[in-house]
Amino acid sequence: MSLFGATAHDGFAAVEAAETLQPDVILLDIGLPGLNGYEVARRIREQRSDDGRPVLVALTGWGQDEDRRRSEEAGFDAHLVKPVDDVVLGKLLAALGAGNK
């Protein structure tokens, strides 16, 4: 197992990075320029088959009920509102089985 990270500064770059790097876990902001995080999540879900699906976590400042509903509809596995505690994120990823592929 290895740990590797990448940063994308807009939605189009995020989709490209997900396709190229094939990560197990993606922490994704909703308010990205270009494509918003909801659309990025949809495109990532379309790219990857069920057995290769990454864990998608919305990590965002948007925390209203409508934001959470839209995250779920877009294919996110979880929705966390910033600032996020390291322990909370670690427990969530463990519960989702992130990195166990």
Image (cartoon, rainbow, N blue to C red):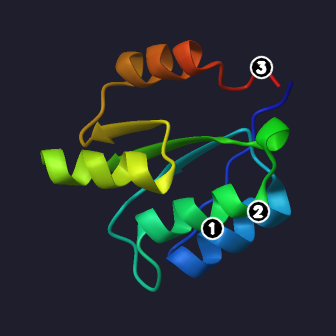
Q: Earlier in the sequence, mark 1 or mark 3?
A: 1
User: Is 95 situated left or right of 69 in this image?
Assistant: right
Instruction: Name the secondary structure under disc 2.
Output: helix
Of residue 5 and residue 77, the one placed in the foreground of this image is: 77
The residue beneath circle 2 is 47
Instruction: Name the secondary structure under disc 3.
Output: loop
- Pair 1/3: label in front: 1
Q: Amino acid at mark 3?
A: Asn
The residue beneath circle 3 is 100
Report the number of discs. 3
Q: Residues under labels 1 and 3: Cα distance? A: 23 Å
Q: Residues under labels 2 and 3: Cα distance? A: 20 Å
The percent coordinates of residue 61 (x first, y second) are 22, 53
Q: Residues under labels 1 and 2: Cα distance? A: 6 Å
Residue at 54% in and 59% down:
41
Q: Are marks 1 and 2 in contact (CB under 8 Å)?
A: yes
The residue beneath circle 1 is 43
Residue at 72% in and 66% down:
17
Q: Quadrant of residue 42?
A: bottom right
Residue 61 appears in the figure = no
User: Is 13 situated left or right of 24 in this image?
Assistant: left
**Mark 3 neighbour density, 10 Å: few (under 14) some (14–19) many (20 or more):** few
